[in-house]
Image: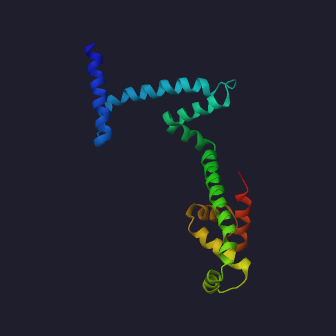
Amino acid sequence: MLKFVGGLVLGITASLSYVKWGYTPPTAFELADRLKGNVISTVTEEVLYDLDKPIEERARALEVFFQNRARYAVQIDARFKYSFMQNLYRQRVISEARQLRIAWGAYDVLLNKPALRKAQEKKYGTSDTATLKQSLLLEALSRKTFISQWIGKNEAPATRQTVYDLVVRLGKMS
């Protein structure tokens, strides 16, 4: 009983020390966490690789797997040319494209206000509505660093028309 109480007190103290002051226990004490992670991973894999289990259970198992075996998950992703990471990037691009698509619709409201339209015409040197909207879109795109980088690496050069086409195409995706 004394060992149990002592271990409990030591565990609580170590946890509080880590959270409060960033104290990391010596390497010897990390072995228990590694074993715990491997036990959890073994149980998780039983659910994850049982295709008869409901998708919700397998998705939860995948979440736990990522929490406990993140390095291994990255190794698997690397073997498959980072397909998970690429899909994560695509999802981010789609999300940012949706935001730009919403902004595109708001440009009509902006350009319907004479004072604001005049300021935009002066700024961009044109009175053509389509060109003004595309200029505003490119400016908004320049503030979205990730999608700008992604376009540069994966799409045609970022002209007014290609950006508009991309935002329309990606903004419709789910």
Q: Nearer the viewer, residue 146 or 118?
A: 118
Q: Is residue 137 above or below residue 67?
A: below
In front: 55, or 47?
A: 55
Give percent across and percent down for residue 92.
61, 54
Give the x, y percent position of residue 116. Answer: 62, 80
The answer to whether residue 168 is above or below residue 53 is: below
Which of the pair 106/6 is nearer the observer? 106
Q: Position of residue 153 (x, y in %)?
A: 63, 62
Residue at image x 64%, y 51%? 91
For the image, the number of numbered tags is: 0
Percent x, y of residue 113: 66, 79
Relative side of 21 to 78, left or right: left
Left or right, residue 112 beside residue 75: right
Q: Residue at x 56, y 26 (%)?
A: 44
What is the image's colouring? Answer: rainbow
Q: Quadrant of residue 173?
A: bottom right
User: Which image quadrant: the N terminus?
Assistant: top left
Residue 31 shows up from this direction: yes
Looking at this view, name the residue that lies furthest to the top.
1
Can residue 159 be seen? no
- The quarter holding residue 164 reads bottom right
Residue at the (65%, 71%) spot, across then down: 137
At 67% from the left edge and 63% from the top edge, which residue is drawn? 102
